[in-house]
Amino acid sequence: MNRIVAPLALLLFLPLFGLAAPFLFPGNDQLATGTLAHLWNFVLGGYIASTLVLILGVGVGVFVLGVGNAWIIASYDFPGKKIFEWALILPLAVPTYVMAYLFVDLLQFSGPIQSTLRVLLGMDSLWFFPDPRSLSGAIWSFSFCLFPYVYLITRTAFLERSGRLIEASETLGYSPLQGFVKLVLPMARPAIFAGMALALMEVLADFGAVSYFGVQTFATGIFKAWLSFGDRVAAVQLALGLLSFVLLIFFIEQSSRSKLRYASSSRGKPLAKTLKGNKAFFAFAFCGATLLCGFLLPAFALLQLLFKQGLTIDIRYLDWLSNSVSVSILTALISVALAIFFAYSVRMNARLSWVNRLLGFGYALPGAVLAIGILSFLEIFQLAWWMSASMLVLIYAYLVRFLSSSLQSVEAGLARITPSMDASAALLGLSKGQILKRVHIPLLKRSLLTAGLFVFVDVMKELPATLLLRPFNFDTLAVATYQLAADERLAELALPSLTIVLVGLFPVLLLSRVISKS
């Protein structure tokens, strides 16, 4: 078993080799300096500027929404808190590209909000109303869709901070706000950075939302270079530029945590002061407005589009659903099997722990970068025809991208099984394979189900890699939703979008159940 662990792990690392392949095997491209010069002179500056503005704006947005809601929920009691503490993670069920379509549909000139305001104000046009299909609209949409990453991690950090911190700040003459800014917030910096890093990597990996908003980022540039111009070198260079942004965020997050050392001698009692009057109203209003913009209004817009379409169902819907479900189930099963193999191998041989860390890097690869790496690798060896022949290339991309999520779940489950159980089973004459089959797998049923569920949902929502790597005439729900939105057929995307959202609700509701019990 140990002999094939490393080669199998390196096989899942080939997309990075594909990104370097054009430089190692230039072929007929000759890595023309004109390609890079053209990118730099005409588009690269715009890509860098818009990407920086986007991640800075979304960073501020998810910080305000995530940290603000986490502090209110963790620190105070007010009407509606029991609902908000789990409902605030519901926006995670809405893919960013679906959020973008619904956001524009709500706020555009013919949308319900502007139409109602024009009637109430007696105006033919609202000149002061911002254009929803813009960079600011993208920042707004991403912030409300991704803030739960910060909320979840930061809420836990706030709950773990002893209530004595605020009590100590009050003895020093600080107000509750000053105590939060000067004591609690610095103590939660590692958690905040981790949540923001996850959200910003999702922003960098997105293609559907930014293309719909008309924002020119590295992701949209990659698709233009490959699909519109057929320029492999330009696509790879842009993919490397996008990957550098991801690695920069990853490095900042890791370095910020490595320099900080926080410890708590005891969990202490969580600070939960009861709010009354205006303070309770403002806490309810802040959490309620966040939930309204992040989930309730998009859900309302989705249902409105569905009713507008009526009872008619696109005849292609069943094909989209069948394709999505089949590839998601197949990927989930393979992913769980590989996760068991790698996690158990590391448990048996601790020297292989580097393998799991290597596989975890795949989740940080944006879908567009991953797809370009695979396409470049296949083109070097004249194997691109595989994509039109089967789903193997697409499933391989999903495994590289999402294996780490199932691996983490299986590792967490194995960590709860004491090594003494392995020793006892070995004394009874069981081999390593028999121990896995008869001892570990029965105890890992819940972890395996959770791992498969998360991979299934991730594959259902994945768009960039699917757009580039899917076989001929193989459309999934995500691809169909993107294509319908690109054609401005918003009413027709309601059903596939609603299906994706409903599937995404399963892990979110599972997570919310854990939160409500805690």
Image (tube, rainbow, N blue to C red):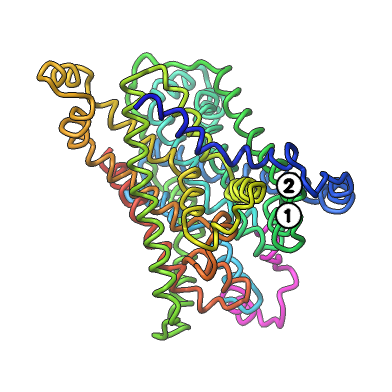
Residue 322 % position (x, y): 38, 68
Q: Is residue 277 left or right of residue 142?
A: left
Residue 77 drawn at (x, y percent): 35, 41
Residue stretch in magenta: 112-137
Compared with 352, 342 (above or below) is below
Q: Quadrant of the C terminus?
A: top left
Q: Is residue 187 above or below residue 233?
A: above
The reply to whether dot 1 and dot 2 touch (C-beta < 8 Å) is yes
* Residue 204 in view: no
Tag shown at residue 244: none
Q: Amino acid at mark 1?
A: Gly
Percent of width and height locating residue 404? 44, 38
Residue occupied by mark 1: 221
Q: Which residue is mark 2?
A: 238
Residue 191 against residue 289 in the figure, above or below: above
What's the distance in space between the residues labelled 1 and 2, CA to CA?
7 Å
Q: Residue at x 37, y 57 (%)?
A: 505
Residue at left offset 56%, top offset 54%: 465
Q: Mark 2 or mark 1, which is nearer the start of the sequence?
A: 1
